[in-house]
Image (spheres, rainbow, N blue to C red):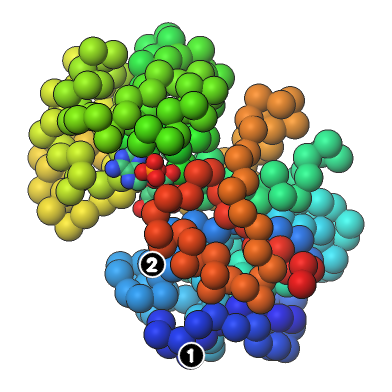
Amino acid sequence: MRVATSASADEPLRLVTLPSRVLGADEVRVRVRAIGVNPVDWKMRTGGPLRMAHHFVGPRGPLVVGVDFAGEVTEVGSGVQELTAGARVVGGTNFARKQLGSYADEVVVRPDQCAVLPDAVGFEAAACLPVAAVTPSVVLHDLGPLPENPRVLVLGASGGVGLFALQLVRNLGGQAVGVCSGRNVGIVERFAGIAVDYTKGDALVAARAHGPFDRIVHAVGSATYPLAGCKELLAERGVCGLVVVRPGDYATIAFSRRFRAVLGRPDGARLRPLVAALGRGELEPVIEARFPLAEAEAAHALSRAGKVVGKILLIPDAT
Ligand SMILES: NC(=O)c1ccc[n+]([C@@H]2O[C@H](COP(=O)([O-])OP(=O)(O)OC[C@H]3O[C@@H](n4cnc5c(N)ncnc54)[C@H](OP(=O)(O)O)[C@@H]3O)[C@@H](O)[C@H]2O)c1
């Protein structure tokens, strides 16, 4: 199998051939056709809490980052009943299960990490979903009940997480208000959001005209949009889901029920309703760029620049 890896964070990712892992009885092998790039992939290379966790509980050997994958099952373990060879799936790798990341032409995962794709859903569209769509669905569904027709503020509305957040709110019958820069007002409005242009002044002040909010999807970070300002925008029972958590946020999270740290860990159960929505045309992934897996480093440079609209994909078979 080929993986994209590097000996250290300072060296560019390059393709390396590794022996394929022997399949466990409860595992499946997936031929990867498309990989979604997430900021966590390049953050993992340099350090942080997830890298620390990977060090202690992750697989040995070269660091292979990446979570999102879509592809075909090529082999199933002797104890697997949920999937058969040939199934088209989307899923997320899990280093806590000693699995390598998804920047590879094959992954070995367990069936509960996968959702089956209907014929109408392509690999590229599916590979956009795992981290970027599961994360806002956690914010919307796991942080307490929402009223009918909720009002939701999305900070970072044009990114991978943000564009799915806007669409999920619309699908719930709610009204999303998305904070973005002037160049992205059009796309935020297209996904049924009211756009607030952060280049025109204090976005939290401007958002007040559209609140109060039952939920905030905070996908930018409290250095840019302070938690005190967010709190003022919340409805009486409103909750702010912190998709980006900074060390200074933990005291607020510990003492206020209004702020919750969110981890968008994709698995089959989380992905199935999102795949179904994709199949019905109720979710539309926006793909800014595709790179061959061999050019993963260029994909990381683009993601690091922080201006991506929607998703970047890596394609193992592209040259
Ligand atoms: N906790 C979790 O499980 C989890 C899951 C997914 C993501 N995350 C984190 O959440 C963050 C967002 O992820 P992502 O995948 O959406 O990233 P992304 O796609 O790289 O986000 C890029 C977008 O952010 C927008 N942006 C930058 N500064 C902004 C600002 N001040 N206000 C509003 N929008 C701004 C940019 O638009 P402009 O160019 O117009 O500014 C761009 O469209 C990342 O830090 C990521 O690591 C965490």
Please state the horizontal and vertical placement of residue 67, each as a whole percent of the image. 55, 61
Q: Secondary structure at mark 2?
A: helix
Q: Is residue 37 above or below residue 24?
A: above
Q: Ligand 1 closer than 8 Å to the CB at disc 2?
A: yes
Q: Reading the chain from its start, which is encountered first: label 2 or label 1?
A: 1
Quarter assignment of residue 182: top left
Relative to residue 125, is residue 216 depicted above or below?
Answer: above
Q: Nearer the viewer, residue 278 or 57?
A: 278
The three-letter code of the residue at mark 1 reads Ala
Observer able to see residue 179: yes
Instruction: Identify which residue, 49 or 75, lies in the foreground.
Output: 49
Which x, y percent locates residue 170?
A: 51, 19
- Residue type marked 2: Lys
| Image label count | 2
Instruction: Identify which residue, 117 or 302, lies in the foreground.
Output: 302
Find numbered disc 1 in the image and state the secondary structure of the residue it sits on: loop
**Farthest right residue?**
86
Q: Which residue appears at 27% of the width and 35% of the height?
A: 199
Q: Quadrant of residue 2?
A: bottom right
Label 2 with label 1: CB-CB less than 8 Å: no
The quadrant the N terminus occupies is bottom right
Query: Residue beneath label 1, please?
Result: 7
The residue indicated by pointer 2 is: 43
